[in-house]
Amino acid sequence: MEKFEVHILGCGSALPTTRHFPTSQIVNIREKLFMIDCGEGAQLQIRRSRIGFSRLGHIFISHLHGDHCFGLIGLISTLSLLGRTATLHIHAHRDLEPLMRPWLDFFCRGISFDVEFHPFDSKQPATIYDDRSVTVTTIPLNHRIPCCGFLFEEKRTPDHLIREMIDFYRIPFHELNRIKNGEDYTTPEGIIVPHSRLTTPASPPRKYAYCSDTTYLPENTDLVRGADLLFHEATFAEDNAARAKETCHSTAKQAATFAQKAGVGQLLIGHFSARYEDESILLREAKEIFPNTLLAQENLKITL
Amino acid sequence: MEKFEVHILGCGSALPTTRHFPTSQIVNIREKLFMIDCGEGAQLQIRRSRIGFSRLGHIFISHLHGDHCFGLIGLISTLSLLGRTATLHIHAHRDLEPLMRPWLDFFCRGISFDVEFHPFDSKQPATIYDDRSVTVTTIPLNHRIPCCGFLFEEKRTPDHLIREMIDFYRIPFHELNRIKNGEDYTTPEGIIVPHSRLTTPASPPRKYAYCSDTTYLPENTDLVRGADLLFHEATFAEDNAARAKETCHSTAKQAATFAQKAGVGQLLIGHFSARYEDESILLREAKEIFPNTLLAQENLKITL
């Protein structure tokens, strides 16, 4: 199966701790790297994880709180020192570009590549990235400032041809691509051989959903339905449910309830408040509702 | 003896490695904390070193390359989340304030304290900080952009009174401060008792000099003469002497030659190029010229 991995670079929240870096993740889909959020130290964590910098093309910033974007300037600066030439695309709220430009002009003089900003609207779900193999769609979230999650969806890969059947019907080479992509075959005599007789189905396309930072938003369950993996913030345990509400964050229980309603395969919780030295309380509370839950941690890699 | 410590938070250079954070140090003089440079991740390193954030009052930025200042915005943001109220003073090239202000306004809305920028001229040595116990003086350096090192000088502490002599001469209480600070005592009969008969000398004031980033600058030796500890950048070994010259950095040998000419007590080298996986070559080259040399490393604490 082709690669679809999520690497956690950081899963803490705004206050630094000795245990966590602020939020940042790398999604590797068929050796294309996408970054989600870029907290301070993200580039140090990429270096530690031995992920190659060069295959990173697109960065998605959920919202403009510092713990989700203060690592951008250092990362870009390093990519320039490394002589990158490919354009780097940053998808974020429109306020980011006017903040970043003066810093890029000053600190990255003579930068070796272009940085393109792609603003997105945080109110409506929209497909903001699309290539041969993957789409990225925004998931409107509810936080103190405009904020979106992201849904990474693999495109369906072609079905596998059954060599014996192709030979049996003497199907010409130029028909094969159409058949792989779902069509039936009509013989010169006009007989229709159904697609399903000629192929075995490709693996179902995989989905990764990222929801941080946000209050509990059950209206989003349809958007992420059936995701193989859901990352959902769980800043607080139930002991701080009031604080979660006040700061527009979620509790572990809310993250799990959301995962359950959305029928996802696995839940990964993160964005932990600095107050929990031992995060097992968060895991326990989530697992009571959604047993297939994992705690995020730095350098964790999950294969979908 | 009162506290005078240097904590290394990071001693790498521009490219991140798995071994080093970019440049940042904390100088603790009698429980007042001063920061020198603030590379990305400095706040994470402060947290790891268990140094309290709150006693940090003044930050000195040598020059406006990202690996010396990208950590500022995250640090300030965290100090605000922690509810700091005391003014934070940043001493830096005048270009820093106009770069930082829009970020502070955007990312630190409702910040709980004032941030004051104090520009300094990087061409002339000048005392840019002065209190009861310490002065900080700039050391003009030669780098690709305006750059200064910093000399931290303890002020002379009062001498220690010899209790028996004070009693013997029945010296009144109100005279004691003057005597501690260097004056002789004149008895009611007009006899002069010399200061040296009444006191034992205080420990000599200590000095810490920080020189990074810079080419080898022998003309600076008088400025740092007799420092107890000198931090000098040693980005390269002799194998890259040409590259050092080209990029306005120093080799380990040059750092050691400078230390020797300046007659300092101890040399600490750092700002290592990412190319040296094993920095012992830098230490070896420096020690050949100045034996009392140490390699900087993260979380190293040196007491002067």
Image: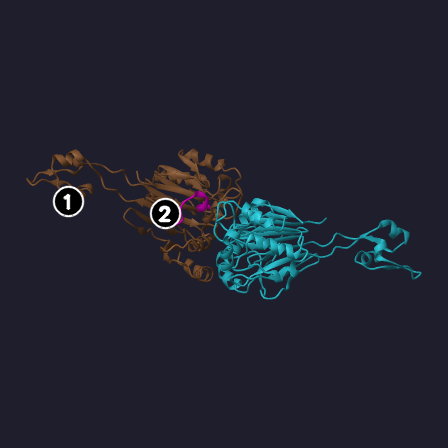
Chain colours: A brown, B cyan
Residue B63 coordinates in the image, percent (x, y): 54, 60
* B276 is higher (above) or lower (below) than A160: below
Label 2 element class: strand
Q: Quadrant of the N terminus of chain A?
A: top left
Q: Which mark is residue A33?
A: 2
Chain hosting mark 2:
A
Mark 1: secondary structure: helix
Q: Is residue B193 left or right of residue B35?
A: right
User: The disc labelled 1 sits on which kind of residue?
Assistant: His
Q: Residue at x 49, y 56 (%)?
A: B243
| Mark-to-mark CA distance, 1 and 2 | 33 Å
Which stretch appears magenta?
A: A45-54
Is A297 part of what is drawn in magenta?
no
Query: Any mark on residue A174, and which?
Result: 1
Residue B118 rendering spot, x and y as whole percentages: 59, 63
In the picture, which quadrant includes the C terminus of chain A?
Answer: top left
Question: In the image, is residue A211 above or below residue A118?
Answer: above
Question: Circle 2: is it few (<14), some (14-19), or many (20+) Cα within 10 Å?
Answer: many
* Residue at the extreme left of the image, as rendered: A189
A49 within the magenta span: yes
Q: Are marks 1 and 2 on the same chain?
A: yes
Identify the residue at horizontal 71%, vertical 49% (top origin): B2
Q: Nearer the viewer, residue B106 or B285?
A: B285
**Residue A241 appears left or right of A181:** right
